[in-house]
Amino acid sequence: MKNKKVHLVGICGTAMAALACMLKERGWEVGGSDAAAYPPMSEILRERGIGVQPGYEASRLTPELDLVVIGNVAAATNVEALRAAELGLARRSLPETLWHEFLKALPLRLVVTGTHGKTTTSSLLAWGLMSAGRDPSFMIGGELLNFAANYRLGRGEAFVLEGDEYNSAFFDRHAKFHHYRPTHLIVTGIEMDHVDLFSGLDEIVAEFRRLLEQLPRNGLLVAAADNPVLEKLLPRVPARVLTYGWSEKADFRLLEHRPGPRGGKFLFRTPAGEKRELFLSAYGRHNAENALAVAILLYDLGLDWEEIGRGLGSFAGVKRRQEIIGRRGETVYMSDFAHHPTAIARTLEALKEHFPEHRLVAVFEPRTATSRRNLFQEELGRAFGAADEIFIAPVHGAAALADEERLDTERLAAALRAAGRPAGAAASIAELQAGLERRAGARELVVLMSTGDFGGLFRRLGPAPGP
């Protein structure tokens, strides 16, 4: 029997490349195209024998294809998408393909969602299962430092996924996480985000409400107790619900977090009234919350506290999340993905706690659809409160936004200065780099916050730290 043939439109996206590799492992004949066929994803695909064709051409779509997977990067006018429709080829979004080819046959579909912490929490969940010998499958939208790739096809019963409320494809306007049909779900909280897709918080809440109400009765929801938006949705959830957090109402209540140079210990109380302590090799109270959510789910799946503790303590983290990328003298350079005001505030608070002898310098690039706009203009002015100094980079792709909707970086810097924080808005990435290099060597922790490559700034501030 011949192998099935699949073509992926937009194959070099982090998740699409992972899907391509997974299909290849399952015996499919895989190829694809992308207008941004660049490393590292193009190299990963090449190493696995998957051809990547640059740009999009209708002639690549032929009748013998069994499936066309169309990524979210493709618009309805994409010539390959149009050709697939013209030929009547079977087409699916990435989440649909995951369901049909990998998820529906497995009894445990473990999904992590919420506005913040999805990548770190799902990575920690996958590693917790792996370190306990449960041999999970997973696909996660980040570079997991405990694993060789951001996907894995294991032999165990569980598949771990990072669930996103963003839509699936131009022809599939459902949130991605609906396709995964979780049996077990972690929700870290719900806030406004993705202003390019949602006009207000109510629309986001509606997506989460639908997800929660479709959980199976024999399933489990692990929910953040400290999020008032999420709390209102819990009464209508058909599955069992276990809450976690600092709130007195939490089923698993955090009592204390003690920071250290390589992570932190957190003390919590179980529903039975037992007090337990675990160590997580990551910084901050927010990561202690994420770790507790994972611990609850792992314990419910049958792992004991000792197994859970080994997994949390040996977690290596995720690239671009509190990752030390270089040192010069006593200056430490760190890369982080934070872009929402809540994530920025909590990340900086954590680093201030864990690096008390360093002056904390925050360098922020507004790059996401939400952070480039002035939706959080005032909130951003408060988000940097834990930093000793703040530098704001130019808004990425500023020319594409009208003046009245664009984040005003000069106004943001002025608001920070008015609050007593030294702050400046740079005119260019080059200006920013020159300023940082002039001060290199001082005892500072410089946190570079961007969801992209920060104009190459990550690569140029080094050298990389030793082992």
Image (tube, grey):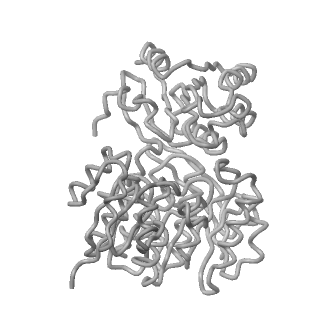
> Can residue 299 be spotted in the picture?
yes
Quadrant position of the C terminus in the picture: top left
Relative image position of residue 402 (x, y in whole percent) = 68, 32
Relative image position of residue 234 (x, y in whole percent) = 74, 72
The answer to which image quadrant residue 361 occupies is top right
Relative image position of residue 205 (x, y in whole percent) = 73, 62
Quadrant position of the N terminus in the picture: bottom left
Task: Identify the residue at image location x=55%, y=79%.
Answer: 183
Task: Name, please, the residue furthest toward the front.
Answer: 86
Task: Name, please, the residue furthest toward the top.
Answer: 438
Q: Relative to 72, is 392 on the left or the right?
A: right
Of residues 358 and 393, the one drawn nearer to the viewer in this rendering: 393
Q: Relative to 68, is 165 on the left or the right?
A: right
Task: Identify the residue at image location x=42%, y=66%.
Answer: 84
Residue 57 in the image: above or below residue 320: below
Of residues 299 and 190, the one drawn nearer to the viewer in this rendering: 190
